[in-house]
Amino acid sequence: MNNLDVSSSTTPTDEKRWQSSAKNYGLIAIIFHWTIALLFIAQLALGYLMSGDDVDPALQFNLFQYHKSVGFVVLALAIPRVIWSVLSRKPHPPAGSGRAANIGARVTHALLLCLTVAVPLAGWAVASTSPLQIPRYVFDIVVVPGLPLEISDKSEALWTGVHETLAYLAAAIVLLHVAAALWHHFILKDRIFRRMTPSRPEKK
């Protein structure tokens, strides 16, 4: 009976799929992208629901706690994602795309990366400056300490405004980003959208 070579199950091609190339995003970038994207969209929905005037107080409190918990998860994922994005290789722009379109795409991506850090960080500041000082739990598992900021109604109002402004800006850019991805996929029919999915990458 022949001995099985376990090492042969992992090929250099499989290992390269985890890293981005000139034509495709790697699995690490893809996992970061879709995980944070889904959590970020959920955060926008939670933020909208919990801000309603007719929401039951008990439900509103629970929504606030979920919003804070998911926000800390987003922040914990966004920081290494930014580092990975800076250090890893990026796919080249599609052939035939103009200079203005390429610059716009890079600016949009950079803004989204920054906002995935800035929005939850501003939310953390809101919770840290609130005079109520409700403990900052992550799904009732981990207590997160407050930021070293002034605790007052004025400070809380300031950071609430910053948090909401950044959230609305992020929502607008996300809509623009989604619209551009769908335009590339259905109208231009290029690989811009597909290379951010875990499908088999295009060969070099």
Image (cartoon, grey):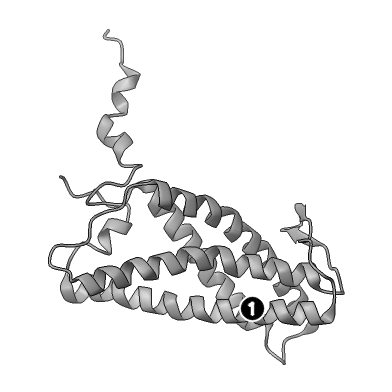
Badge 1 amino acid? Val
Rendered location of residue 75, percent (x, y): 60, 59
Could you say whether the residue bearing mark 1 is in a helix, strand or loop? helix
Rendered location of residue 173, percent (x, y): 43, 77
Q: Residue at x 63, y 76 (%)?
A: 163
Q: Is residue 178 above or below residue 6?
A: below
Q: Which image quadrant: the N terminus?
A: top left
Residue 155 found in image quarter: bottom right
Query: Would you say 108 lies left or right of 47 here?
Result: left
Q: Report the residue marked by disc 1.
A: 162
Instruction: Please indicate, yes or no, whether residue 35 appears anywhere in the rendered image.
Output: yes
The residue positioned farthest toward the top in the image shown = 1
Q: Is residue 20 above or below residue 179?
A: above
Residue 204 found in image quarter: top left
The residue positioned farthest toward the bottom in the image shown = 54
Query: Would you say 21 lies left or right of 80 here?
Result: left
Rendered location of residue 41, percent (x, y): 51, 71
Instruction: Please indicate, yes or no, whether residue 58 appears anywhere in the rendered image.
Output: no
Q: Residue at x 58, y 60 (%)?
A: 74
Q: Residue at x 30, y 75 (%)?
A: 180
Q: Residues within 10 Å of mark 1 (few under 14, many from 20)?
A: some
Query: Would you say 53 lies left or right of 82 here?
Result: right
How many numbered marks have been drawn onto this rendered protein structure? 1
Query: Would you say 38 lies left or right of 19 here?
Result: right
Taking depth in this image into account, of 197 and 100 the one nearest to the observer is 100
